[in-house]
């Protein structure tokens, strides 16, 4: 429900996803885009690879949230043996325990790892002492998640059919961007490599990473060093709402292809977040605002897709690097304030 990190360590860790580092393991991991859905002559499918990085048996629960923020929880869906890695083909469309059994779905997934037979319920005062205030249970266990979303011809066998797809790495919960880090300039990210011309098109994904707040996004479009047009402020996003739309839909009045349609990039930030009615009782008086953003550039001829990850405007400092990689025998103190908080109740 809530997790707290010392600021110095937190900033270093939060930067992990934006820098495409290998800090991917967590007891709660987001996949921002996954589904099983038909569009035209193609069916879009997500394969999922999950790793248990602990020496305990881990039971995994999954939250699915669609483009309107409607959430479905799949408690105790499957179990991984100690250090087991397992792949799930068509995870969203396949029936449990090897999938969610949803055949017309596109949204985000949130994976939760719990020690098998343990208690990861923060309201369980015996199995999770202090969980109501700390949001941390002793039986939380780390997992990592990788996914590939791809298309096949309708009616074909995904195991043998030609496919066209892209990677979505699972984001650990602590890597979301939040407006509450504006004083450290960690409230905004940029996505570069966007293209809109005769050869390419680009989609932009925006994800509310909090279960306990409604939020809006401010998106700015640039070409080179020049901002194009006015800022785009989105409609409010419901808790855990995940939306992907064409860049031309976000900025419909821009004069495309804007020269040769390259050198385009966007800046994304979050604002006007307001807590839900149950936020305070779940330890999130501010709503624990957080978000993810990504881009997807597609070849207009082959439909080949490339995932574009967000990046911070700042680098990790020497002090933050020392928290992650202390010298041999060195003791580093990495505690300070403010704190970052988990935005989704663990299942």
Image: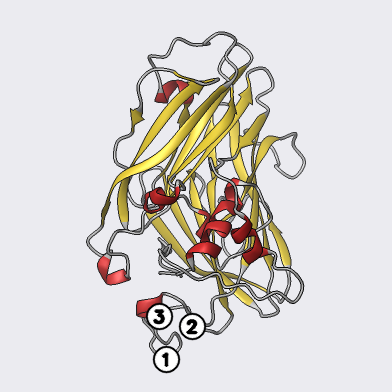
Check disc 3 and report its element: helix, strand or loop.
Answer: helix
Name the residue at 55% across, 8% down: 259
From the image, tell me which residue sits under label 2: 119
Dot 2 and dot 1 residues touching (CB under 8 Å): yes
Residue in the picture at 38% in, 88% down = 125
Residue found at the far bottom of this picture: 126
Q: Which is more toward the observer, 161 or 60? A: 60
Closer to the chain start, of discs 2 and 3, is 2
Q: Is residue 222 above or below residue 118?
A: above
In this image, 52 relative to 34: left or right?
right
State how far apart marks 2 and 3 are (Cα). 11 Å
- Where does label 1 land, which residue? 126
Colour treatment of the image: secondary structure
Left or right of residue 284: residue 157? right
How far across and how far down the image is residue 184, in percent?
A: 44, 50
Q: Position of residue 264 (x, y in %)?
A: 55, 22
**Vertical placement of residue 102 versus 50, above or below:** above
Secondary structure under badge 2? Answer: loop
Q: Residue 168: which quarter of the image?
A: top right
Q: Is residue 68 left or right of residue 116?
A: left
Q: CA distance from mark 2 to mark 1?
A: 9 Å
């Amino acid at each position: 429900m809530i997790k707290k990190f010392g600021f110095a360590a937190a900033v270093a860790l939060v930067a992990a996803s934006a820098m495409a580092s290998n800090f991917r393991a967590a007891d709660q991991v987001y996949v921002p885009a996954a589904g099983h859905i038909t569009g035209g002559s193609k069916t879009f499918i997500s394969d999922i690879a999950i790793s248990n990085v602990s020496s305990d048996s881990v039971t995994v629960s999954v939250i699915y949230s669609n483009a309107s923020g409607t959430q479905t929880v799949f408690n105790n869906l499957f179990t991984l043996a100690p250090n087991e890695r397992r792949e799930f083909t068509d995870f969203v469309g396949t029936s449990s325990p090897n999938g969610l059994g949803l055949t017309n779905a596109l949204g985000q997934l949130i994976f939760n790892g719990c020690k098998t037979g343990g208690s990861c319920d923060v309201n369980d005062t015996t199995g999770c002492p202090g969980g109501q205030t700390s949001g941390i249970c002793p039986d939380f266990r780390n997992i990592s998640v990788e996914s590939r979303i791809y298309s096949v011809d309708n009616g074909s066998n995904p195991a043998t059919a030609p496919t066209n797809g892209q990677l979505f790495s699972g984001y650990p919960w602590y890597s979301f961007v939040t407006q509450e880090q504006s004083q450290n300039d960690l409230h905004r990210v940029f996505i570069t490599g966007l293209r809109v011309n005769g050869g390419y098109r680009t989609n932009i994904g925006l994800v509310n990473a909090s279960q306990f707040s409604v939020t809006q996004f401010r998106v700015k479009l640039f070409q080179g060093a020049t901002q194009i047009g006015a800022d785009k402020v989105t409609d409010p996003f419901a808790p855990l709402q995940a939306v992907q739309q064409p860049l031309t839909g976000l900025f419909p009045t821009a004069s495309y292809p804007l020269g040769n349609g390259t050198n385009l990039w966007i800046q994304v930030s979050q604002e006007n977040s307001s807590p839900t009615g149950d936020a305070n009782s779940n330890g999130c008086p501010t709503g624990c605002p957080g978000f993810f953003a990504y881009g997807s550039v597609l070849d207009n001829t082959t439909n080949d897709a490339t995932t574009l990850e967000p990046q911070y405007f700042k680098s990790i400092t020497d002090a933050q690097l020392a928290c992650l990689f202390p010298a041999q025998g060195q003791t580093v103190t990495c505690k300070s304030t403010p704190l970052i908080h988990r935005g989704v109740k663990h299942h």
